[in-house]
Image (spheres, helix red, strand yellow):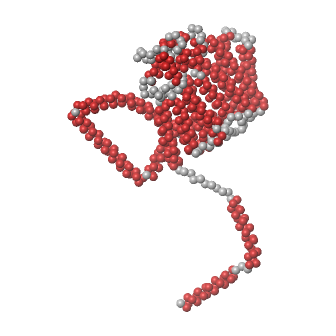
Amino acid sequence: MDNLKSIELQNSQQTQNTQSQTQVPPQIQAQEQPQLQPQAQNTQSHIQALPQFSYTVQKPEKTVKAARFKAFAFPTVLYALFYTFCLYHNASGITYPFFAGGTLWFFSRCIRESKSSSAAAVNATFNKYFLAASIQVAGALNCCTDSGVLLFFNKALMYALLIISLLEMSHDTHNWSITANVRAIFAVIFGAIGKCFDSVSDTCAAISLFRVKDKPRSKEHRRIIISIIIGIIISIPISFFVLLLLGDADAIFWKLLSDIVSRTFELSFEINKTAVKVTARIVITFVISYGMLSFCTDSGRIKAINENAARQKPHFDEYIAITFTAIVAVIYLVFSFTQIFGLFLGKMALPEGFTYSSYARKGFFDLVILCVFNIVLVLCTTAYFKTNKILRSILTVICMCTYIMAASSAFRMFMYIKEYNLTFLRLLVLWGLLMTAVIMAEVITYVYRAKLRLFKYITMTLTIGWLAFSALHPDYWIMRYNVSKADYTLFYHYSGMSLDAFPVAENIDNFNEMRIMRRVDKYADTKKGIDVFRKFNFSKEYALYKAKSADYEPNKDN
């Protein structure tokens, strides 16, 4: 014990000596402290100057697919059922306006809830409401016409505007050029086709994750399902045996059983055939709609389209464009000279074998194609070539010559109509020439104002123009013009005019014998089935009402 105490005393004395040796006088501390503080501040500033890195933890691909399946699967199934109910064997029913509104609501809701949109707030004003209203009007016009051509183009317009709406919902298209918009539209179409099988992969991912999370309960569920299946299999021979004995025991029960079986087999073929078609329509609609949603909400795809659509300056030399456009402009000027003095004023000698009417009727379709080509030529030149005053002047000359071509084509068409009467195709050509004239004015403005949102104005022009053309029921005006000409009513005994022209047809003698009445008979058949509401059409209903008012009996031969 004494030795331990002596050792502790020696250790304490050594520690005191070392502390006394390491103590620093206060004067030295005061001198060294100011030198240490700047060093600490410098180290802090250096630390702050270092680049700051942010790391985002990406979710596994299987988790992303499962989350997408959870968000889109059930709404898409409901939309597929809604789509099939509205449009299955129903090309012009009253369900079309509801289909248009439901489609807009479905896609806008899913894209909005996905929170993957890069669209700016400026897109949510005029473009959004104009596109939505146009789609709704096109859907409403479908249940007001019987013309197959109008129905086809109304549907084409609806789907085209829907794709543009999807772009507006998920991208900031405010500064996109017209070429960027066209590329993005094709990207959505082909991208949605490429994404069609995402519904399958997303379903598999969701099922695999569900199995991992519910592994403890999966064995119990599997046991119950297997037991139920075994019970159903055992019940089949037992039920068959019991039914045979009961049927043999009681004649009334046997008759009831045989009636049920016979009626079931009679309806089985038709039911199965319809069920296959309806199921196929639902599956196809689900796959395509899910693919469109998958493409339009993919953040990587959105970023790629935005980068591809970034406005780029033209990089080709302007003198290349000046050379070939000047040659084209000279050719157009010579042609315009011949049109003004040869066709309009009639002061030039006609080629041998041509009369003035035959000369006027020839070539209007070629000129329509050239008018469209000139619009594409001017747009591609301004998009890919540098511009200057000379090039803009040449492009203006080409645009003005396009007006002369359009006028020449219209003049020739009027001469042709005067000689051979009016048809839907001829009236459609006149509408196309009118739209070309309006669009060409917008193109001329774009030549001098490159920042003009030309795609927006062309879309508005074509949309408003077509909706007005469709609402006017061209068949009515065609038949009215042709019937007003003497001895031309016989043609309509063999023509396939739609019921839009019925208000004119009912004023013709013996209109009950005309081919147009077959459409009335066909529509009258739908009034007897269960699709009375779905297939209601205002134009057809008016024709049926007028036919019955004139004591016409639909399907009287049947």
**Residue 539 as seen in the image, left or right of residue 311:** left
Coordinates of residue 342 in the picture (x, y in percent)? 72, 14
Coordinates of residue 527 in the picture (x, y in percent)? 44, 24
Farthest residue, direction front: 549
Residue 518 visible in this rendered orientation of the protein: no
Coordinates of residue 122 in the picture (x, y in percent)? 66, 40
| Image height of 481 relative to 43, above or below | above
| Image height of 28 relative to 125, above or below | below
**Residue 557 as seen in the image, left or right of residue 181:** left
> Looking at the image, which residue is at 51% across and 19% down?
543
Farthest residue, direction bottom: 2
Quarter in which the C terminus is drawn: top left
**Residue 333 as seen in the image, left or right of residue 421:** right
Residue 414 visible in this rendered orientation of the protein: yes
Quarter assignment of residue 248 = top left
> Looking at the image, which residue is at 70% across and 59% down?
49
Coordinates of residue 339 in the picture (x, y in percent)? 72, 17
> Looking at the image, which residue is at 70% across and 64% down?
44
> Looking at the image, which residue is at 76% across and 30% down?
392
Quarter assignment of residue 412 = top right
| Image height of 251 relative to 340, above or below | below
Farthest residue, direction left: 249
